[in-house]
Structure formats: C-alpha cells, structure tokens
Image (spheres, grey):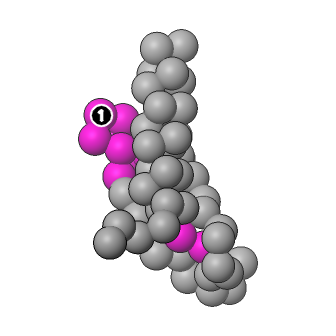
C-alpha cells in the first residue's frame, strides 16, 4: 500500500488501536499492533468500531 492512511480515531481505552481512512473512497483500516485483547476488550472493540462506522458512513446532518 503506497498511499498513506489518514487517522480517523484512536480507541479511548485500548492503547495501540487506531482506525484509519484508506486511500480509496469507503476504505477503512483497523491498526492494532501488538495488542493483546481479552473477551471483554473484544466486545468493547466491536462496539467502538460499530460507532465509528456509523459516524463515517451516515449522511451529513442538515
């Protein structure tokens, strides 16, 4: 991937977990380097990703 990614958000409770916008429209990348997650943290991560996804795919408010 030669194009750069743009940071969208960092997870507020899981250090090292970031969501980035990809170089093409509609692409998102989850970056989690060296992150060990428990079951509860996986649930937290899933909820956080769902929230970010809704924020970035919803049409703008009028």
Residue 40: image location, x then y, percent: 46, 14
From this view, report whether residue 22 is shown above or below residue 47: below
Quarter where residue 29 is shown = bottom right
Magenta residue check for 46: no
From this view, report whether residue 37 is shown above or below residue 35: above
The residue that appears at 40% across and 70% down in the rendered structure is 60
From this view, report whether residue 60 is shown above or below residue 49: below
Q: Which residue does the numbered mark 1 point to in the structure image?
A: 13
Q: The magenta stretch spans which residues?
A: 10-22
- Find the residue positioned furthest to the left: 12
Magenta residue check for 19: yes
The residue that appears at 35% across and 67% down in the rendered structure is 61
For the C terminus, the quadrant is: bottom left
Crowding at mark 1 (Cα within 10 Å: few <14, some 14-19, many 20+):
few
Residue 45: image location, x then y, percent: 48, 32
53, 45: nearer the viewer: 53
Quarter where residue 48 is shown = top left
The residue that appears at 36% across and 35% down in the rendered structure is 14
Residue 53: image location, x then y, percent: 52, 52
From this view, report whether residue 21 is shown above or below residue 45: below
């Amino acid at each position: 991937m030669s194009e750069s990614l743009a940071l969208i958000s960092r997870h507020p409770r899981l250090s090292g977990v970031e969501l980035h916008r990809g170089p093409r429209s509609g692409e998102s990348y989850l970056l989690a380097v060296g992150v060990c997650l428990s079951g509860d943290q996986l649930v937290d991560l899933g909820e956080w990703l769902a929230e970010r996804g809704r924020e970035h795919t919803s049409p703008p408010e009028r």
